[in-house]
Image: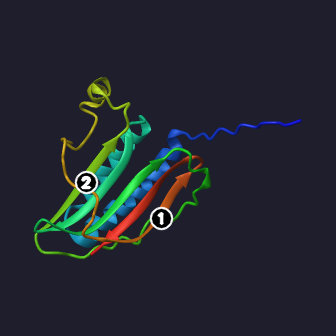
Amino acid sequence: MSQTATATATYTTTDIEKVVRRVTTDLVMIADSSAAITADKAREYGHDIELLAKNGYLKKVDVTLLSAGVEQRAVCYEVNTASGNLESSRPGGVLWPKVASPFLRLVLSYTSAYDDTARAKMAGKLKIGWSPTSADTSHSGLSASGGRDYASNSYGMQRKDWAA
């Protein structure tokens, strides 16, 4: 005789808010330490990340600090909707250097649900004018330097870090 049990992982918009709040805190720390953008701009990015995540459209967020076009630091947050096995960390550990000619690039990757209808639904709600890009986010010129997990119930984001 054998038995099978199924467990379902669930999360709410409150769980998404908790996780994205940690990501936004990281972005504000990056903004403050690198001086590449303002803290207010970092919060606008956080707003859009949260809105896209709550609607099931967000797959990953890649953040890269460039100096005169050369990558200096990077962090990638990948959405995990079965994060029951993740242990949530506190935000932080992302004090980035001030560099010459700083530019902070954020690249969002979307789920397949973010189609033309979804884009129309989001029109006017996002604070950033996102546009398509072919930017390389492999960070092949940087070395992996750790990471953290941010989770609430079964919603999480896994953070991976790179440094020069």
Task: Name above or below for residue 52 compared with residue 134.
Answer: above
> In terms of image quadrants, where is residue 32?
bottom left
Horizontal and vertical percent position of residue 18? 49, 51
Task: Name above or below for residue 130 compared with residue 88.
Answer: above
The residue positioned 40% from the left and 57% from the top of the image is 23
> In terms of image quadrants, where is residue 24?
bottom left
Is 102 in front, or is 7?
7
The residue positioned 22% from the left and 44% from the top of the image is 128
Q: Left or right: 89 with respect to 32?
A: right
Mark seen at residue 148: 1
- Label 1 residue SS: strand
Horizontal and vertical percent position of residue 118? 32, 27
The residue positioned 46% from the left and 57% from the top of the image is 158
Residue reaching furthest right? Answer: 1
Disc 2 residue type?
A: Leu
Horizontal and vertical percent position of residue 102? 15, 68
> In terms of image quadrants, where is residue 93?
bottom left
Is 119 in front, or is 132?
132
Disc 1 residue type?
A: Arg
Mark seen at residue 106: 2
Q: Residues within 10 Å of mark 2 (few under 14, many from 20)?
A: some
Mark 1 vs 2, N-terminal side: 2
The residue positioned 27% from the left and 75% from the top of the image is 164
- Label 2 residue SS: strand
